[in-house]
Amino acid sequence: MAFLGVVVLGYLLGSCPWGYWLVRIFKHEDIRKVGSGNIGATNVWRTYGRWLGVPVVLLDTLKGFIPALVGVLLVSPPHLAGICAGAAAMLGHWRPLFLRFAKGGKMVATCGGVFFAVAPLVAFTAGLVWLAMFLLVRYASVASIAGGIALPVFAIAYGYPLSVVLFGIAAALAILYLHRANLRRLRAGTESRFHFRRTASA
């Protein structure tokens, strides 16, 4: 019962569309109708600047971290419980209940939060890969894909259990799948580079 409860908690927290809610509250607009149309932090930051982008990054990370940490600390087996709760949060971020299962975000920040709970060394190192790639090319999509691919690699390198390695592989594949449109734009040379200053007026 506790295992099921933490998974349900993960999905409900993951379904909180912070990018959509914060833009609605502070800008009275629908983030799905501006920029890329995505509710995630990258689109919020690009469109409205860091004052909304940073809170969305933190909240999207926490909604993966909290249920996964609860699973690790309070439910047995800990790694599996944390992974399943975190995976449910990622699923909720992708297809949020509170947006009637409409298209959500690409799970990168939420996935990072999950790994900080279940495999912090992996999360920290993959985060460094993300940051290095982002500073090098200024494509958030490329950085996200590189960070995703790094997850199973470092899970193996650090000797984490098989469940963490398999979750890393699944997360990397999911991130690749959700960035398929970005990959097409990269091939076509039309992908937008990230700028820290907003590019559209709110």
Image (cartoon, rainbow, N blue to C red):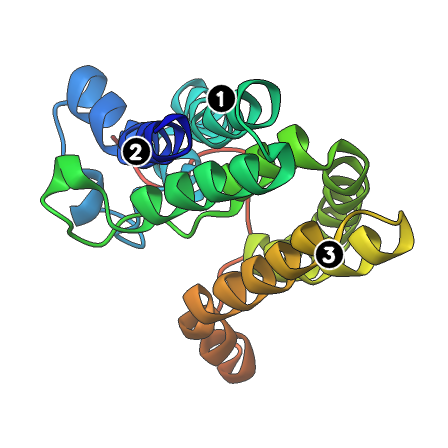
Q: Secondary structure at mark 1?
A: helix
Residue 147 seen anywhere in this rendered image of the structure? no
Residue lying at 30% horizontally and 49% vertically, measured from the top left: 38
Question: What residue type is disc 2 on?
Answer: Val
Q: Quadrant of the N terminus?
A: top left
Element class at badge 3: helix
Which numbered disc covers residue 8?
2
What residue would you read off at disc 3? 162
In the picture as drawn, the residue positioned furthest to the bottom comes out as 188
Viewer-nearest residue: 44 or 179: 179
- Mark 2 and mark 1 lie on one chain; the one further toward the N terminus is 2
Question: What residue type is disc 3 on?
Answer: Leu
The location of residue 127, given as percent across then percent down, is 73, 41
Q: Nearer the viewer, mark 2 or mark 1?
A: 2
Q: Earlier in the sequence, mark 3 or mark 1?
A: 1
Other residues around mark 3 within 10 Å, as few (<14) / some (14–19) / many (≥20): few
Q: Work out whether 48 lies above or below 147.
A: above
Q: Residue at x 46, y 75 (%)?
A: 185
Q: Which residue is mark 1?
A: 66
Q: Is residue 52 above or below residue 159?
A: above
- Residue placed most toward the observer, 67 or 77: 77
Instruction: Report, in whole angstroms, how far the alpha carbon at label 3 lies from the one at label 1.
Output: 22 Å
> Comparing marks 3 and 1, which lies closer to the viewer?
3
